[in-house]
Image (spheres, rainbow, N blue to C red):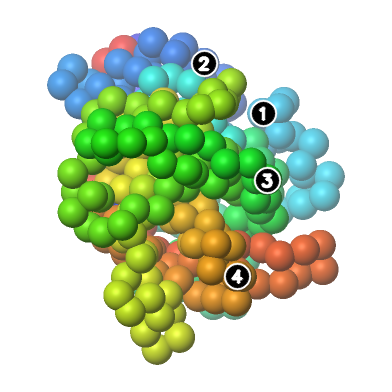
Amino acid sequence: MTIEFTKGHGTGNDFILILDKPGQLALSKDEVKKMCDRHFGIGADGLIIVKPTSKAPEVSHLLEAEPGAEWFMDYRNSDGSEAEMCGNGIRVFAKFLLENNLATLTDGSTLPIATRDGIKDVTATVNGFAVDLGLFTIGDDETLVSAAGLQVARPGLEINVGNPHVVVALADLTELTGLELVKAPLLEPVQPEGANVEFVVLDEPLVTQGVAGLTMRVHERGSGETLSCGTGVAAAAIAIRHWAGGSQNFWKVSVPGGDAAVRMFPTEDGEHVAISGPAELTYSGHWQG
């Protein structure tokens, strides 16, 4: 089987994109894992199948509420498991649609995209794309997080932005750089579906010209440490804002792959969080399965 693919990334978080117009491509976990392997495959943090929403039974019902959401972002982690959403991946997904004339996005317009976490609205920005991740929830109980490089377990805050996260605040950049995230952090209590774990350090000063700043590293469930995590930067900003009393709505989060912006804003159905940042397509090729 020969599969045509495109590679892309958002702040270093990289993906394999495959267009499946007939909606018939069925990749097993092992096939996805092999393609994402950086030694024996193409190499990527995740794989995205670009599929018509109408031909994806798990999300086709979303067209009833949003007929314009013609494309479904079928996202897989590098271990082959399915995920609800990917904040960097959806920007790269939008870039792929536009570059291949599968969708249009003009100034002031919105591109709705179907995901396992519902419809996400993407808009164009000066340096890439912004995506409204929608509502978020903050957990009530602390989670203890153990990680290689930390002498003692640290408390983490559970944040859900369509997928689960646990955010841990560290004292300084020395602690952050000393982490060994090759191994997955251990969570207590254990989360049955796993979680992305973000370790963050506050900038000094925290707020500059109205924008708060953080530095972050992340271990993504099903992928390991990545250079960036779109939903993770949102979760990190939400957690720090919550701990600080909830008054700061504009954030810049620095990750190893670059910078992303986060914004919280009110809507009719509650407070939403949005992220923005670059998206690039790097090359295309063929995979012999």
- Closest to the camera, between mark 4 and mark 1, is 4
Q: Disc 2 to disc 4, how far (Cα)?
A: 46 Å
Kind of residue sitting beneath label 4: Gly
Question: For numbered disc 4, what is the local secondary structure?
Answer: loop
Q: Amino acid at mark 3?
A: Asp
- Label 2 and label 1: CA atoms lie apart by 11 Å
Q: Residue at x 22, y 57 (%)?
A: 173
Q: Nearer the viewer, mark 2 or mark 4?
A: 4
| N-terminal-most mark, 2 or 4 | 2
The residues bearing labels 1 and 3 have C-alpha atoms spaced at a distance of 35 Å
Q: Which mark is residue 26?
A: 2
**Can you give x and y, in whole percent of width and height, for residue 163 in the image?**
58, 39
**Horizontal side, residue 94 vs residue 12: left or right:** right
From this viewpoint, which residue is outermost toward the bottom?
209
Work out whether residue 172 can be spotted.
yes
**Residue farthest along the front direction in this orientation:** 152
The residue where tag 4 is placed is 245
Residue bearing the label numbered 3: 140
Residue at the image point whose x is 77% and y is 52% from the top: 66
Q: Earlier in the sequence, mark 4 or mark 3?
A: 3
The image position of residue 286, as x and y in percent, is 26, 27
Q: Earlier in the sequence, mark 2 or mark 1?
A: 2
Q: Earlier in the sequence, mark 4 or mark 1?
A: 1
Q: Is 103 or 280 nearer to us in this picture? A: 280
Q: Which residue is mark 1?
A: 56
* Amino acid type, callout 2: Ala
